[in-house]
Amino acid sequence: MLRSIYKFFNLHDGEDAKDKVLDNVTANITFKGANLWILACAIVIASVGLNVNSTAVIIGAMLISPLMGPIVGAGFALGTYDFDLLKKSGKNLLTATLVSLFVSFLYFLISPFKDAQSELLARTSPNIYDVIIAFFGGLVGVIAITRVEKGNPIPGVAIATALMPPLCTAGYGLAIGNISYFGGAIYLYLINCFFICISTFFIVKFLKYPKIKFVDKARESRITKTISVLIVVMLVPSFYLAYVLLEEKKFTQNIDKFIQNELVYKGYTLIYQKTQFNSRPKKLELAFLDKRFSVGELQELNQKMELYDIHNTDLLIRQDSSDLRKDILEEISKQNEYVNQKDITIQNLKNELKSFKLDEDKLLEELNILYPNLAPFSLGKQNVYINKDSSEYQYYLIHRNTLSAEEVESLNKWLSYKLPNNAINIVPLK
């Protein structure tokens, strides 16, 4: 019975020759020539699909993308302790990633349509489902690669693991200067790469692919230790990441249940919701249209959160009578402070202008009576800088008519009497 079950699930049944599989994997690693052109074209197609929010176009780009090659190659290299293959896979994956980022960045930079569509936004926040898809998609892919009959799974794996869209979204984030979009998309891309590589490693080990043989035993020992460390470095953070994403998903689901059962179903209209999973303690911030909660009700809600497995979480409800009104009053206070500061500035400018202003009507009337031949003329006050540390105000009377020396002296004395403690300058304008 057990033998029949084992035979039913036996992965060695239909397996291709290991040497042939390794040759095929190695051949699909390199990114140069045709492979690089195909990748660049696939990136442009995927970017257009994300730009116009077309799922069909994005799927088409994923089908022609050769990005899986170096990731699967890295998994085989780890499983067979082939350090040269690992270096080659890493180098080509880095090349493919940089080329993809550059092409998508260039496309979105020149594209006139830069609105964030739903297909773009879906690639900016990884979750536990992305980990599951990448891991099991990678399993399917490597199982298909090791078969004599490759069959239909390969195209499906390319679509499911979705390596292209996160790279294009990262390029979009760079093009519009949104670091949050770029970081989230690169994070999702790395998750996909890690878990495809890990699933490949598991299958290679399960199918018992032989370790590469070295003539130099010391070098073999050194490489074996190095790759063993790399495997641990990849496995431990990856499983921790999967655990964190799973906990975040559970937290979000519990929050939604709590809000629906304890608040929305009771007729309270929710107008604002914000959760912070990564803060310590975690936070849930809510606001309602017209419901005001008493201190007792808030305490009761905090206790009920424990029933929904929501632990170490602060509940903050912004209410019209307190928090929201406080924010409004603070904003009004800021506006009043701004207005007051503006009034002070205006008054200072008025005072400064006043210091330059003359009692023009009376002075001009007397000038015209005493010196009828002076017009046309101008009279003004100017701040004259004597040196870097001192300055003084001086009056300038500029006229166009020719005055005798006696008239200039008389005019100077009269102005000095009218404008005491100020230097007087009478300037003829030729």
Image (cartoon, rainbow, N blue to C red):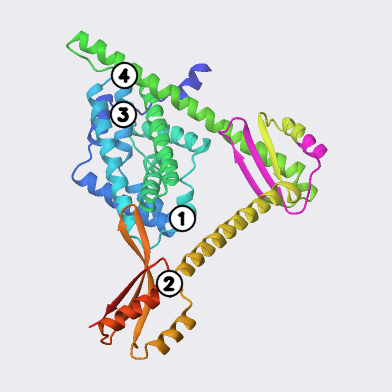
Image check: 372 left or right of 357?
left
Q: Position of residue 211 (x, y in %)?
A: 28, 17
- Of callouts 2 and 3, which one flags the residue occurring earlier in the amino acid sequence? 3
Q: Amino acid at mark 4?
A: Ile
Q: Nearer the viewer, residue 255 or 392?
A: 392
Q: Which label lies toward us, 2 or 1?
A: 2
- Quarter of image, res 189: top left
Residue corresponding to mark 4: 227
- Residue drawn at point x = 68 percent, y = 45 percent: 286
- Of callouts 2 and 4, which one flags the residue occurring earlier in the amino acid sequence? 4
Q: How many marks?
A: 4
Mark 2 in CB contact with mark 1 (< 8 angstroms): no
- Residue drawn at point x = 41 percent, y = 57 percent: 51
User: In this view, which residue lies farthest toward the top?
Assistant: 217
Q: Which label lies toward us, 2 or 4?
A: 2
Disc 4 crowd, CA 10 A, few/some/many (<14, 14-19, 20+): some
- Of callouts 3 and 1, which one flags the residue occurring earlier in the amino acid sequence? 3
Residue corresponding to mark 3: 74
Residue corresponding to mark 1: 116
Of the numbered discs in the image, which one, if any, rests on residue 419?
A: 2
Q: Is residue 206 visible?
A: no
In this rendering, is residue 58 above or below 156?
below
Q: Amino acid at mark 1?
A: Ala
Residue 276 sits inside the magenta stretch? yes
Q: Amino acid at mark 2?
A: Leu
Q: Which label lies toward us, 3 or 1?
A: 1
Cα–Cα span, label 2 and label 4: 93 Å
Q: Position of residue 275 (x, y in %)?
A: 61, 40
Cα–Cα span, label 2 and label 3: 91 Å
